[in-house]
Amino acid sequence: MATTTVSGYILTRLKQAGVGHVFTVPGDYAGPFLETLDQTPGIERVPNMNELGCGYAADGYARYKGVGAACVQYGVGGFSILNCTAGSYVERLPVAVISASPGTKSRALEETEKILFHHSTGDLRADQKVFRNVTVASEIIRDPAEAPAQIDRAVTAMLTHHRPIYIEVLQDVWLLNCAAPAGRLAAVVPKSDPDALRAALDATWERVRRARLPVVWAGVEIHRYGLQKALQELLDASGLYFTTTSLAKTVLDESQKQFVGTYAGPASPALTRAVMDESDCILALGTIITDDYLNIMATSYGEMVEVNDEEARVGYQFYREVTLKDFLEGLVRRFKEQKPRRYRLPKVEPDPPPVYKPEDALSYNIFYEELGGFIKRERLLEEVSLVLGESTSLYVFGNLMGLPRDSFVAQAAWGSLGHETGCALGVGLASGRRPFVVAGDGGFRMICQEMSSLAYHKSNAVVFVMSNNAYAIEQAFVDIKAFTPQGQFAPFDVLPQWDYRALAQAFGAQGYRAETVEELRAALAGLKGVEGVPSLVEVVIPQKDLAPQLKRLAETPVPQHKYRREGGSRRR
């Protein structure tokens, strides 16, 4: 029987799944695995500055490659990367977290003589217990004979459910021999109950047929489960207009006429808000519905068709064992039997663009106009990935139209500050695109040392930091009156001053500072053709600049009676 080592077995399975890079933070328990990794062709070790950066990079990598991997020490490393893993879990990203813990003899001493080995809480299963909450498999490998079955079980679960796994290996087990991998692993594809599927399709078809303005609301599971081609076929066959969640922005090419903008509740563009307001049949396909959408769920729940990885319902009727793939393909077949209908969009005045001169100070929306115009003017749409964080900018840049497929990244469901900068390295390595990161200054400061990782790997990523020295998005929801001339920001939402150009130099990046439109244009011109070095651009924003998108989101009241109409109002 062919044999390998436990570390070799894991790496073979990761390579087969599509992993070409493993993001790492070293530790003595993990040393044998990292040495094997460095000796394994076809898969590369990528060092990070800390575990947050390591986990975010693996998350960003998985968004393009379909699977990612990170290796950290257990305890201090595991608990640090836990936040990243939770984000991958919520947003349906297969990421393998590989961890290392004390060896067999050390564990015996800890259990019998109560010697606390470094990084241990005293419970040698603590990491496994914690990771069970945010993974679809959580394994500790103690016996090399059992390792293949444990690893295969975990990797299969990761591929099937498109969510993270946790594999912890004892230090003295890494290099022990085990059976070599047999064949390849694949996702277990669930099947729909034929009767339930038919009933769900019949009920949906009846609603669509009667609807005046049905609309597709596409979610990120369309991307995660490889259903983009099927969704495009549905739109082509039906003539339906479509929007997406913020998390799923660019799930399809947005230059097509049927795209009506990204829906982010009250923060959406005027046309998108109007379409969702007027729609009498919303087809929510593969959506992860967050609290950005409380208003539409409160007013349109009963009119909505919602099919995703967790449920299938038509209005208030639920259908068990109906998969998104089967449902979507069934709809495509039905629409192909009919001629596409023509639907009339509501007439609305577009949101007015900002009016400004070169010498004017910057604002969120002026920056949005300038950067969006630069990307289109320089024909960078196919070369750049926009990476947005949980900040005001997410809702501003969500208004962009005309973006190509798979060119926008945002952790819009989990919303961990700093994700955008941390995941840039993984996005660049997996996609081959140049990451253009737009980060809030609060989030950037949590993960700023990942500029060093970008420099180490000679990435030409650009990180734009919206510099207003405040957690502005939080302040908007705490007390929006703080943005008035007489208002005051809460002390806990105010940040100290940083010198970003000095920071860029310290991390090996090139630095820019832009306070006016003219200075921003000069900085953008300097970014053209840059290779082998990241750039950090401080975009100075007045602290009390309140983007209208965020203002609408923060000021719109949520209906008190969820899922029930109140009078005639259908405000979104």
Image (cartoon, grey):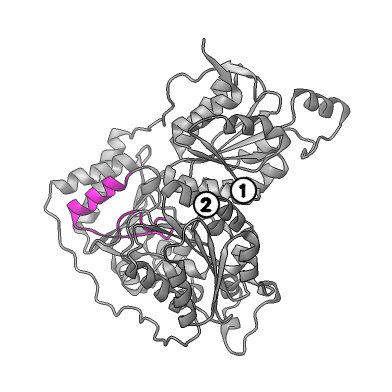
- Say above or below: 537 vs 430: below
- Residue at figure coordinates x 60%, y 51% from the top left: 53
Residue 129, visible in the rendered structure: yes
User: At which x and y percent is residue 547?
Assistant: 48, 77
- Give the CA separation, mark 2 to mark 1: 10 Å
- Tell me if 465 is positioned left or right of 161 in this view: right
Please, what is the three-letter code of the amino acid marked with disc 1? Asn
Q: Quadrant of the C terminus?
A: bottom left
Residue that label 1 marks: 48
Q: Which mark is residue 425?
A: 2
Asked where in the image residue 348 lies, by quadrant, the reply is bottom left
Report helix, strand or loop for mark 1: loop
Few, some or many C-alpha atoms within 10 Å of disc 2 (few <14, some 14-19, many ≥20)?
many
Asked where in the image residue 452 lies, by quadrant, the reply is bottom right
- Say above or below: 559 vs 135: below
Q: Which residues are magenta?
A: 227-253
Few, some or many C-alpha atoms within 10 Å of disc 1 (few <14, some 14-19, many ≥20)?
many
